[in-house]
Amino acid sequence: MSAKKTIEEGLEFSPKFDEGGLITAIAQDAKTGQVLMVGCMNRAALDLTIQTGFATYFSRSRQKLWKKGEESGHFQKVQQLLVDCDQDCLILKVIVVAGQCHVGYQSCFYRALKKGSNKDLEFIAQKVYDPRKIYKT
Amino acid sequence: MSAKKTIEEGLEFSPKFDEGGLITAIAQDAKTGQVLMVGCMNRAALDLTIQTGFATYFSRSRQKLWKKGEESGHFQKVQQLLVDCDQDCLILKVIVVAGQCHVGYQSCFYRALKKGSNKDLEFIAQKVYDPRKIYKT
């Protein structure tokens, strides 16, 4: 098989990290299918996620590994890890018991573009917890 | 409101493109919730998507705008466009009538990491069309 075909049709997990050493990881609720958040992982974050069964990301803003929920308690238990055709993107099917967005919503995707507009958003969800009670810093 | 709060809690759509002028866009089946593919958009691709109602991406490998389905006929009709808290990632809720992955599957995410392994994948889907009959080049 060609290298491309091996990556696309083979069964060897060979995640492709970008020039910054990162890969996009989508957390999707394993029960509802709702996309909860999108983060990125470096090799160490991915290894920790696989080893521990809990999602660990790499924070670009803080430049450090970040176990989702380490501050809020809103962890992501990984049920399944999917990879796409060219192996440069991951989906984590996760079990969660609390809101996953630091703003207070279940999902980070709580706004949609209004029909007919290219600049106005509308809320499509309500907050499920008060972040002021969870994040002390 | 602070700039951060305006982005996170406001209703002005202000997508944040990265240093390469791109934003991640996830195509999710509007009916089933299945994540179909992940691509990226530049400003022109996003504008075309909003204007036409059909998903248009920017191909990094070909360095050009790419209307999904232009070769295969497997278009994505956009029903809703969601944005995340920091407005650096989009979800397109799309209506599709044919397989969305160029390898022949409904979704690009047709493989999962085997339980207990960190290197072996397993197929979790079957092909829904024969790409040799669709892609002539």
Image: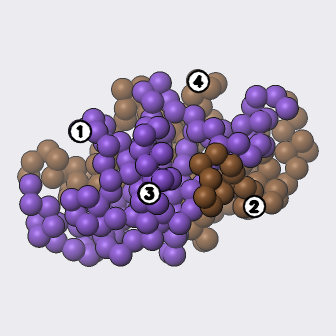
Chain colours: A brown, B purple
Mark 4 element type: loop
Which residue is drawn at the image coordinates 58% and 24% (left, top)? A63
Where is residue A133? Give x, y as percent: 91, 44
Q: CA distance from mark 2 to mark 4?
A: 30 Å
Q: CA distance from mark 2 to mark 1?
A: 37 Å
Q: CA distance from mark 3 to mark 4?
A: 39 Å
Q: Chain of mark 1?
A: B
Mark 2 or mark 4: whose residue is earlier in sequence: 4
Tell me the amino acid under the disc marked 3. Thr
Q: CA distance from mark 2 to mark 3?
A: 26 Å
Viewer-nearest of labels 1 and 4?
1
Tell me the amino acid under the disc marked 4. Gln
Q: Chain of mark 2?
A: A
Viewer-nearest of labels 1 and 3?
3
**Residue A129 placement, left or right of B128:** right
Q: Residue beneath label 2, please? A: A125
Q: Chain of mark 4?
A: A
Q: Are marks 1 and 4 on the same chain?
A: no
Which residue is drawn at the image coordinates 72% and 37% (left, top)? B7
Viewer-nearest of labels 3 and 4?
3
**Label ID, residue B62:** 1
For residue A21, which quarter of the picture? Answer: top left
Q: Residue beneath label 4, please? A: A63
Is residue B17 shown above or below A101? above
